[in-house]
Image (cartoon, helix red, strand yellow):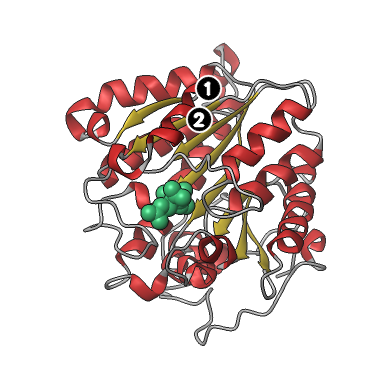
Amino acid sequence: MNTHPSTATVATPDVTARPAWAGRIDGIGPAHRRWHSAVNADEATTPGAAVIGFRSDEGVRRNGGRQGAADGPGEIRRALASKALDAGIVVHDAGDVMVVGDDLEDGHDRLAAAVSSLVRAGHTPLVLGGGHETAYGSYQGLANSGALDGQRLGILNLDAHFDLREASRATSGTPFRQIAGLEADRGAPFTYAVVGISEPSNTAALFDAANALNVVYRTDEECQERHLSDVLAFVAHFVDSVDVLHLSIDLDVLPAASAPGVSAPASVGVPPTVIVEICKVVAASPKLTLVDVVELNPAYDIDYRTAGLAARLVHTLTVGSHRARSRATAPTGPDAVAAG
Ligand SMILES: N=CN[C@@H](CCC(=O)O)C(=O)O
Ligand SMILES: [Mn+2]
Ligand SMILES: [Mn+2]
């Protein structure tokens, strides 16, 4: 057991009562492996998926939403803990970055430093929000790591909202407007796609901003099960068009019945099965470098529905990514067949 060295300076105590990485134990050994027994079991230097929490309510508070997302990371860990995990999948927990008081900017700086360090170490950060202001700190970490140098970044946001608001300071509604500014600063095109846009939840000003920034999107109505092949083609085309992929999942993309534990529940939403299929397509790409799962508000959850779905998506991405990498590095050709 160990803790990741790059996170020693950012780890903060988990103030919630139950331990996050505890769960069902059926026996010892790989056949009984679950997240709770796998987390931090490998050397910190072994590349893998690295969970990191961003305990922030401040972006939602500034955006006039209902607070509670700071408790999201602990609940997602708890929902992940007993999920079965194939042998060989490396998962780390890099701890939490906590926003202190209303100092979101300091929190963003510390999250960026932690994400940057994880990316440089070859890990795939799985950043658990926090409100969607999380994505701005995540992006800054990716940009500061050097992984974007000379590369075209694509941001795929699964969300009912564009989050392209203009404001004098960061909120949960501004992250992608802020990122657009930083992408322009580095001379890169802002390459941003949103899946699940709820038309009545975004004003004309937000659609105008999206159009001005060449944002591509599909509405929630265009993402129902009957449109699955079109949705997956949209995602695959977007992934093909970039070099590095940042996936951001706002849990309010899901229907309120499946994900009540968010600040702004969706009356229509994109079905969980469609979101899972999107995650599989994204995880199959070696371009996937950074993931956020944001806006879980445990105070409004019902029977852990939202936390459970958030954990399922984190799990699907982790397993899918591992399997794709294993396939890519597996020996091929006549020798492999002879050996097999
Ligand atoms: N991250 C959330 N963003 C949404 C919230 C909308 C709402 O609270 O109704 C937004 O600002 O558009
Ligand atoms: Mn959002
Ligand atoms: Mn949203």
Q: State the image coordinates of residue 166 (x, y, percent, origin top left).
A: 58, 42
Question: Of 85 and 203, which appears nearest the observer?
Answer: 203
In the image, residue 138 sits, relative to residue 214, either above or below, namely below
Q: Amino acid at mark 1?
A: Ala
Q: Answer with left or right where residue 106 lies relative to residue 138.
A: right
Q: Is residue 86 visible?
A: no
Residue contact at pointers 1 and 2, CB within 8 angstroms:
yes
Q: Residues within 10 Å of mark 2 (few under 14, many from 20)?
A: some
* Residue at image location 48% in from the left, 44% down from the top: 317
- Say which mark, if any, is on residue 209: 2
Looking at the rendered structure, the secondary structure element under dot 2 is helix
Which mark, by number, is residue 212?
1
- Residue pictured at 63% horizontal, 53% vertical: 170
In the image, residue 215 above or below residue 318: above
Three-letter amino acid code at disc 2?
Ala
In the image, residue 306 lies at what x, y percent? 34, 62
Q: Secondary structure at mark 1?
A: helix
